[in-house]
């Protein structure tokens, strides 16, 4: 088929192609054609060898050589990408390859895939002469693939210990309200204390508020948060740190101030190293530590399963509704949190928890089966 198209480059053409490849500034399609012409020069390589070396099709090699012989170097390198009837659609194999590329690591030196990078890589690995960015975008949208996005996610180890703690928590949540044995969720959050370096400008008719992008870090505040969904109650406590002593004092407040009449407080919390009875013995005399602990029953969420702690949802509400701004003054922080919690408590704002044991076992069927727990 392609015997009559014999490529013979002159010195000027060869130099131009070598310079083009060494600079690497052209798109992948153009670089591929330049390499085809250099390898085909004076029949140094057979078409099949060129195709294999460059991951190109025989037809691509043939068309490039023909274009060079009939129309010259510029035509061979910059062949019109337009095709009769519109842009070429991806075949099933090409679409699968695109998905595979998009789900792989980005090229060295790049933090993420872009549409242009994906198009160039797909052209380099297939017989495609060209591919529009819109085609790449639409195919990725159909497959719900967004290679330029990345979410931070805590991936748990789903084992028997995870299941045991998860089912314990879900069982606890399923119990009806019992004022004598309340279920209270507990965790802490961090707030970066930030001051303006220039006075902000308030909003006015026709003008938005203005805040200078520069700021000054003042310190870091810790916020302990209690949450009782049955009462629609929460309590925020601001501290400079989150040491064992701070935790112990929170437990003392829980027993003596917030729930003095409770027989037993079922406390849901995570596995932070200070979240344990030992912290109370480090802080108080043994008699006081034991008095407090007699009224608290700890229920720990599985490791890497903060989603099971309802207070995490309320911390998100607190951050969005109250703390999403620059706060530099400790008293202001305490006052603003107090106003926020009072308003929420007066509303008896709560959480409607929908995830129970039956849904957990249905949703995680394969994981249960892997553990022979089904």
Image: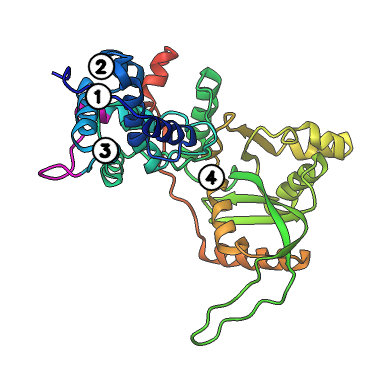
Badge 2 is on which residue?
Answer: 47
In the image: residue 184, left or right of residue 64: right
Q: Are marks 3 and 1 in contact (CB under 8 Å)?
A: no
- Tell me the element at label 3: loop
Q: Say which of marks 2 and 4 sits in front.
A: 2
| Residue 246 x %, y % | 79, 46
Magenta-drawn segment: 82-95
Q: Residue at x 48, y 32 (%)?
A: 22
Q: Are marks 1 and 2 in contact (CB under 8 Å)?
A: yes
Badge 4 is on which residue?
Answer: 310
Q: Residues within 10 Å of mark 2 (few under 14, many from 20)?
A: many
Residue placed furthest toward the bottom? 205
- Quote the CA–CA distance across marks 2 and 4: 65 Å
The answer, for residue 148, to whether it is visible in the render is yes
Find out whether residue 236 is within the magenta segment: no
Q: Residue at x 35, y 17 (%)?
A: 53
Badge 3 is on which residue?
Answer: 130
Q: Say which of marks 1 and 4 sits in front.
A: 1
In the image: residue 1, left or right of residue 339: left
- Quote the CA–CA distance across marks 1 and 2: 7 Å
Q: Residues within 10 Å of mark 3 (few under 14, many from 20)?
A: many
- Tell me the element at label 2: helix
- Tell me the element at label 1: helix
Badge 1 is on which residue?
Answer: 61
Q: Earlier in the sequence, mark 2 or mark 3?
A: 2
Q: Residue at x 60, y 63 (%)?
A: 322
Q: Earlier in the sequence, mark 1 or mark 2?
A: 2
């Amino acid at each position: 088929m392609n015997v009559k198209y014999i490529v013979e480059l002159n010195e000027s053409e060869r130099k131009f192609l070598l310079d083009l490849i060494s600079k690497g500034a052209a798109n992948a399609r153009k670089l591929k054609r330049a390499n085809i012409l250099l390898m085909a020069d004076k029949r140094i390589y057979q078409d099949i060898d060129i195709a294999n070396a460059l991951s190109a099709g025989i037809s691509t090699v043939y068309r490039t050589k023909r274009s060079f012989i009939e129309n010259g170097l510029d035509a061979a390198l910059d062949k019109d990408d337009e095709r009769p009837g519109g842009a070429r659609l991806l075949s099933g194999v090409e679409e699968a390859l695109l998905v595979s590329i998009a789900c792989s690591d980005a090229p060295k030196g790049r933090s993420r895939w872009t549409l242009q990078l994906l198009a160039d890589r797909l052209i380099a690995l297939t017989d495609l002469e060209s591919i529009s960015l819109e085609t790449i975008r639409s195919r990725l949208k159909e497959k719900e693939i967004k290679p330029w996005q990345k979410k931070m996610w805590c991936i748990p180890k789903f084992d028997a210990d995870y299941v045991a703690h998860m089912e314990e928590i879900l069982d606890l949540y399923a119990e009806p309200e019992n004022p004598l044995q309340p279920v209270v969720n507990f965790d802490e959050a961090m707030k970066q204390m930030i001051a303006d370096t220039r006075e902000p400008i308030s909003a006015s008719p026709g003008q938005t508020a203005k805040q200078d992008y520069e700021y000054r870090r003042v310190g870091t505040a810790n916020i302990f948060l209690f949450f009782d969904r049955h009462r629609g109650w929460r309590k925020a406590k601001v501290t400079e740190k989150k040491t064992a002593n701070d935790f112990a004092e929170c437990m003392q407040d829980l027993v003596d101030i917030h729930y003095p009449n409770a027989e037993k407080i079922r406390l849901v919390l995570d596995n932070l190293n200070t979240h344990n009875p030992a912290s109370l013995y480090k802080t108080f005399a043994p008699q006081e530590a034991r008095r407090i602990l007699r009224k608290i029953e700890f229920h720990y969420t599985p490791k890497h399963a903060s989603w099971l702690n309802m207070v995490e949802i309320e911390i998100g509400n607190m951050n969005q509704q109250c703390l999403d701004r620059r706060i530099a003054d400790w008293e202001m922080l305490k006052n603003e949190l107090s106003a926020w919690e009072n308003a929420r408590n007066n509303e008896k704002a709560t959480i409607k928890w929908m995830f129970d044991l039956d849904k957990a076992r249905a949703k995680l069927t394969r994981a249960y089966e892997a553990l022979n727990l089904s």
